[in-house]
Amino acid sequence: MPLELFLDLYSPPCRAIYIFAKKNGIPFEFRPVELGRGEHLKPEFLKVNPLGKVPALRDGDFLLAESVAILLYLSRKYQTAPYWYPPDLQARARVDEYLAWQHTAIQLPATNVYLCKSLLPHFSGQPVDTVRLDRLLGKLKPALQHLDQEVLAAKPFLATEQVSLADLMAFTELMQVSFSCLFALWGHSGHRAESSALATLSPQPTAVGCDLFRDWPRLAAWRARVEAALGPELVQDAHKLVLQPRDPRDAQQDPRLAQELVHRLQERLS
């Protein structure tokens, strides 16, 4: 039985795993799990991960959750290029250091910005709460400042001199915030982006008050280096869903689910 990856590509950690597997030629069956439709709460998925969260992995009878654990499992099982998770003790420790730090410093505040900017307006039908958004962006700022002014002042990537799992995790998280800001220009105006705007990820997506890379030049240069290392085509493939604004009609297909999600989001972002 082939390796199975249960992913929702709206999720940054899921996209990190998808990119890593594709980049390294790891054979897998892609099992999409749509969080927005509550598929992570269905009995069949709860057999894979009783916690009801993505990403998840099934390798024969072996089940595994948590994005970092899955990335490390894949890197070890398939013996991927050493730069992803270096064998050198201290270089590996730097990757571990970032992966441990990013959960609360990057992933949590970046996810909250995305939820406030994109998901909550989508399911509630209400405009973005700009006061809340500014507060949430303020919680992300110290981490961005640390990466730009300290970490990337010393080296081209976050942990070593080459791209690693640390960069992959950070890249998908920060791109999520950027694209959610772009939705202010696309998603709630009733218009789709022109196809030419989707043809490349090179231009920095921006919106008033939410240009993630504007004040952080080293972070912007790092983003370009990571994208080049991963391959622009693969990056675009992984981000196709995020680049397409959500259809507001989707939120009304199951009003009860939408109401429950709004309640959960309001509770989390309060």
Image (tube, rainbow, N blue to C red):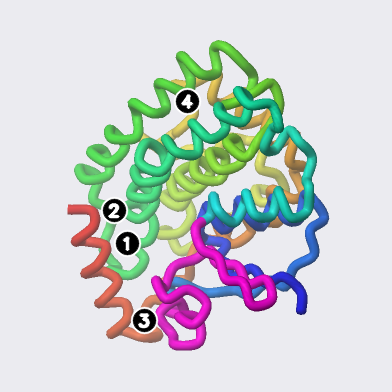
Residue at (49, 82) in percent of width and height: 47
- Cα distance in 3D space between marks 3 and 4: 36 Å
Say which residue label 4 marks: 214
Q: Could you classify mark 1 by the number of other residues whose Cα lies within 10 Å: few (under 14), some (14-19), or many (20 or more)?
A: some
Label 4 and label 2: CA atoms lie apart by: 21 Å
As helix, strand or loop, the secondary structure at mark 1 comes to helix
Q: Which residue is mark 3?
A: 252
* In magenta stretch: residue 129: no
**Distance from Cα at disc 3 to Cα at disc 1:** 13 Å
Side of 209 relative to 223 (left or right): left
Contact flag, marks 2 and 1 (Cβ < 8 Å): yes
Of mark 3 and mark 2, the one earlier in the sequence is: 2
Looking at the rendered structure, the kind of residue marked 1 is Pro
Mark 3 or mark 4, which has the lower sequence index? 4
Q: Which residue is mark 1?
A: 121
Q: Earlier in the sequence, mark 4 or mark 1?
A: 1
Q: Position of residue 173 (x, y in %)?
A: 50, 44
Question: Residue at label 2?
Answer: 128
